[in-house]
Image (spheres, grey):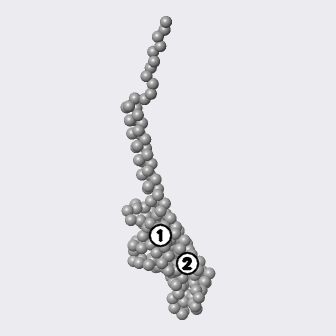
Amino acid sequence: MKKFVTLPSGFTLIELVVVIAIMVVLSGTSIAAYYRFSQKQSALNDARNLATEMKKIQALARNLVYPAGCTNLSSYNLFSDCNGGCQTMSANAVCGSGLYSALRNDPVLSKGLFQSNINISFGAGTGSISPAIGAYSVTAAGDPYQVEVTTDLNGNIDVKEL
């Protein structure tokens, strides 16, 4: 008669601990990578929002959109509502008959803050930008990513990662 020997089946405690430790390390690094990715995307989104706002006001100036009561439009001005540390912008149409609000306290940034005062003019009829060459930084507090919205002599507005 033959005897059957049964071998122990299953995992040892050491094997389970090693597998769990590997899973913890992998999940920790993936969570950190996702957090960095999320920070980078929020900085890029804020810069894109600023560029969109600039292009919107530039289009108003280029297409000679007169606000009600405005005569002899000369330019549009886009400016941040504080000297650094805020998230909103306003715009005025500069007319022969005075200033007319085109945009008031529009929230442009969601997580970032304007690091310095922004004041940009767009020429009526041409959309030319003054100052012609500029770089406007957008960063969030504690965020390592810095993004710039740049303008050039041709009136182009672009978003650049630093």
| Quadrant placement of the C terminus | bottom left
Q: Which residue is mark 1?
A: 109
User: What percent of the width, then of the height, locates residue 85?
Assistant: 39, 73
Q: Is residue 41 visible?
A: yes
What type is the residue that disc 1 sits on?
A: Leu
Q: Is residue 54 above or below residue 96?
A: above
Q: Is residue 35 above or below residue 155?
A: above
Other-residue count near label 1 (Cα within 10 Å), few / some / many at <14 / 14–19 / ≥20: many
Other-residue count near label 2 (Cα within 10 Å), few / some / many at <14 / 14–19 / ≥20: many
Image-based side of 54 in relation to 39, left or right? right
**Mark 2 or 1, which is nearer the eye?**
1
Image-based side of 64 in relation to 49, left or right? right
User: What percent of the width, then of the height, locates residue 73?
Assistant: 57, 88
Q: Label 1, secondary structure: give it.
A: loop
Q: Which residue is mark 2?
A: 57
User: What percent of the width, then of the height, locates residue 140?
Assistant: 41, 65
Q: Residue at x 59, y 77 (%)?
A: 59
Residue 75 occupies quadrant: bottom right
Q: Residue at x 53, y 75 (%)?
A: 54
Q: Residue at x 44, y 78 (%)?
A: 81
Along the line of sight, the residue nearer the viewer: 79 or 17? 17
Tags 2 and 1 touching, CB below 8 Å: no
Q: Please, which residue is most extreme toward the bottom here?
A: 97
Q: Label 2, secondary structure: give it.
A: helix
Q: Is residue 157 visible?
A: no
